[in-house]
Image: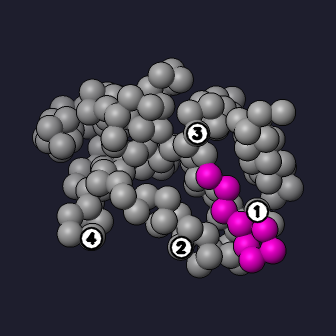
Amino acid sequence: MTTYEQLLIEVLEFRAANRLDLPHRQFLALRNSALAGTLRIFRDALSRPIGYVAWAGVCRETAHRLLRRLEFAAYPYEWTEGNIRYVVDVVLLPKERRTGLRQLKAVFANSRALLIARREHVRLYTRRRGIWRLRQEAEPHAPDNAAIRAAARA
């Protein structure tokens, strides 16, 4: 079994053990992340899984499309085409949140831009001098928003 398959199976088992549903679109995102090597499982001191993060490395054009249309990066090649980290899924066990957040910060320690989609909103965070700041937020009913144009130049 390949590393990709092992990672995907472990994440699917984690979701099932914690009774988390898995829509088809989210499964495709997890699969693409596993294939691209952009899926990390967080573990406690006993090496038990406590959460995971899946992301894509998108380019400016894809980030612009995501902000403008709230469209999902659907193609596997989009997972490794740029340096903007598009977080597609994060799950942390509530009782291990502190440990999980520490590991999550380590994953993105060298990143300069994060796109995070949550509940029909996409937010672009940028880091300057070690501090993350919300730079733009796009909502589904504001396609000509000035923040979207600015994000394309980010």
Residue on which the image places disc 2: 102
Say which residue appears at 62% left-offset and 52% top-offset. Answer: 40
Residue on which the image places disc 1: 49
As drawn, 112 above or below 27 = below
Q: What residue type is labelled 2?
A: Arg
Of tags 2 and 3, the one toward the viewer is 3
Bin the neighbour count of mark 4 within 10 Å (Cα to Cα): few under 14, some 14-19, many 20 and up. Answer: few
Work out how far the residue at label 3 is from the one at label 1, CA to CA, in angstroms: 18 Å
Q: What residue type is labelled 3?
A: Gly
Say which residue appears at 84% left-offset and 33% top-offset. Answer: 1
Q: Which callout, 4 or 1, points at the residue further toward the start of the chain?
A: 1
Dividing the picture into quadrants, the one containing residue 41 is bottom right
Q: Which amino acid does label 4 sit on?
A: Ile
Work out how far the residue at label 1 is from the one at label 2, CA to CA, in angstroms: 14 Å
Residue 52 x %, y %? 64, 56
Bin the neighbour count of mark 1 within 10 Å (Cα to Cα): few under 14, some 14-19, many 20 and up. Answer: some
Q: Which callout, 3 or 1, points at the residue further toward the start of the chain?
A: 3
Residue on which the image places disc 3: 37
> On the picture, is 72 further left or further right than 28?
left
Badge number at residue 131: 4
- Residue contact between numbered discs 3 and 4, judged by CB atoms under 8 Å: no
Q: Confirm whether the magenta stretch covers residue 41.
A: yes
Dividing the picture into quadrants, the one containing residue 24 is top right
